[in-house]
Amino acid sequence: MARRRTLRPDEAELWANVARSLRPMHAAQPLPKPEPEAPSVFHRPEVTPAPPEPKLNRFRVGERLKAPEQHDILPPLPERLAQAPVLMDAKNHARMIRGKLSPEARIDLHGMTVAEAHPELIRFVLNSWSRGLRLVLVITGKGKQGPDHGPIPIRYGVLKHQVPHWLRLPPLGPCVLQVTEAHLKHGGAGAYYVYLRRHG
């Protein structure tokens, strides 16, 4: 590697003269100044609101904690069916829920899968309606509760929850007038009375 040497005084003077005579090839362009924004009629200066003060529950030593209110968003299925408006004859409805009306036909879906039970229910209800039957019984079973290993509760009794839903949807919805939980002597919580509309 070549060793760098210092300029002698006469060389330094010569270099200074050359450097003074140099002119840049491209003159530096001055940067344009940003134009001030004209105040807009619709533009308002943004004002950041002060953050709200945190609402802290004052708690004193020895004070009991008030338990929060329990909110059940979806009432149990029997309660929802009981609160449904009565669309059929009130006298017949009262006799039906007391178990005084005998079903004219029945189907037992207990033990079937959802894929098996849905077409069977459609076939049974449509056939019963076309024959002019009014009250039929659909047995679903109460459902078998399995082990619950997680924090989210698992719904058991899939058919018990699906059948009322299926009875409201086409093709069964237009044929069905009322759905209620069956009386104990006809299966109780494991069966439904399905009161059909008049055919034709």
Image: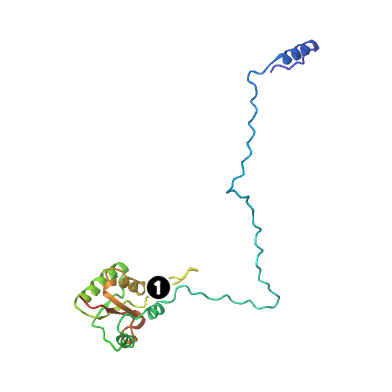
- Relative to 90, say whether 115 is above or below: above
Residue 125 picture quarter: bottom left
Horizontally, residue 58 falls left or right of residue 191, namely: right
What is the x, y in percent for residue 1? 69, 18
What is the basis of the colouring in this image? rainbow
Q: Residue furthest front?
A: 41
- Relative to 107, say whether 21 is above or below: above
Q: Residue furthest right?
A: 9
Residue displayed at 24% across by 81% down: 134
Helix, strand or loop at mark 1: loop
Residue displayed at 73% across by 17% down: 4
Residue displayed at 64% across by 18% down: 25
On the rendered image, what quadrant is the C terminus found in?
Answer: bottom left
- Residue at numbered disc 1: 156
| Mark 1 residue crowding within 10 angstroms, few (<14) / some (14–19) / many (20+) | few
What is the x, y in percent for residue 105? 23, 80
What is the x, y in percent for residue 162? 35, 71
Task: Please count the marks in the image.
Answer: 1
Q: Amino acid at mark 1?
A: Tyr
- Between residue 155 and residue 41, name the one nearer to us: 41
- Relative to 199, say whether 33 is above or below: above
Horizontally, residue 137 falls left or right of residue 28, namely: left
What is the x, y in percent for residue 31? 64, 30
Residue 62 picture quarter: bottom right
- Between residue 178 and residue 49, name the one nearer to us: 49
- Between residue 41 and residue 28, name the one nearer to us: 41
Residue displayed at 65% across by 27% down: 30
- Between residue 58 and residue 110, name the one nearer to us: 58
